[in-house]
Amino acid sequence: MKCQKCDKPATFNVAILTGAEPQELHFCDEHAQEYLNQPAIQGSSVGSLASILAQGVAKKMSISKAAAELQELDQQTCPICGMSFHDFRHHGGLLGCPYDYDFFNKQIDAFALNYHGEHKHLGKIPKRRLTDSGERLLLIKFRRDLDDAVLYEDYERAAKLRDKIKEFEQAGGR
């Protein structure tokens, strides 16, 4: 069946039971959205009831559209650490690497606004923070190497890496 307003296939069917005979309407997604967003006829209880029902259906359609968009966002992964946006949302909002802030920038802004109600950080700034992204990467590399050394029980190398990290942090790094 085709839409009553265009040649696209009808995906939304409405049966209006107000008169002697039921009236059927058939719309594509685009025209269904237009139909559902029409204001109710003034002074008509049937019109207002139809408007309430239409708003409910429109809300469900927008929720399903948002769910599809979220599913698409969840598939995005950081090219550096491989973390997906789904992992970020389902693991307490923890990111995998410093580049996730750049890669998921729009999503993080929306997430922060929804969660905190603000975009701007109003809290304290750490006294010892990294100023250069190269320093961040170096510190991350040291920490990963330390984890590997401990995992492979190379304690001599682990001690050297621990000392490097401590020295790095005291010199103004994190």
Image (spheres, helix red, strand yellow):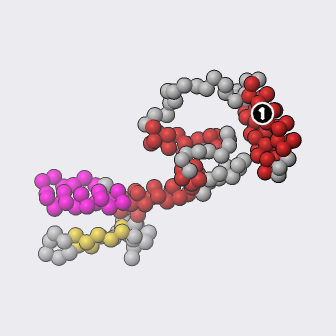
64 vs 125, left or right, is left
**Does the magenta run of residues contain 44?**
yes
Horizontal and vertical percent position of residue 108: 55, 42
Number of labels in the image equals: 1
Left or right for 53, reference 90: left
In the rendered view, does 116 fall on the left or right side of 108? Answer: left
Q: Is the magenta stretch mostly helix, strand or loop?
A: helix
**Quadrant of the snapshot with the N terminus:** bottom left
Residue 99 image-quadrant placement:
top right
Q: Which residue is drawn at 44% across and 69% down?
A: 8
How far across and down, in percent of the image, does residue 40 sit? 21, 55
Q: In this view, does 98 lie to the left or right of 12?
A: right
Q: Residue at x 50, y 30 (%)?
A: 120
Q: For residue 134, say whether it is visible.
A: no
Q: Name the residue under label 1.
A: 165
Residues shaded magenta: 38-60
Q: Nearer the viewer, residue 154 or 29?
A: 154
* Residue 57 horizontal/vertical position (percent): 32, 61
For the question of whether residue 54 can be seen, the reply is yes
Which of 120 and 35 lies nearest the eye of the viewer?
120
- Residue type marked 1: Ile
Q: Position of residue 100 (x, y in %)?
A: 64, 43
Viewer-closest of 10 and 101: 101
67 is higher (above) or lower (below) than 113: below
Viewer-closest of 29 and 156:
156
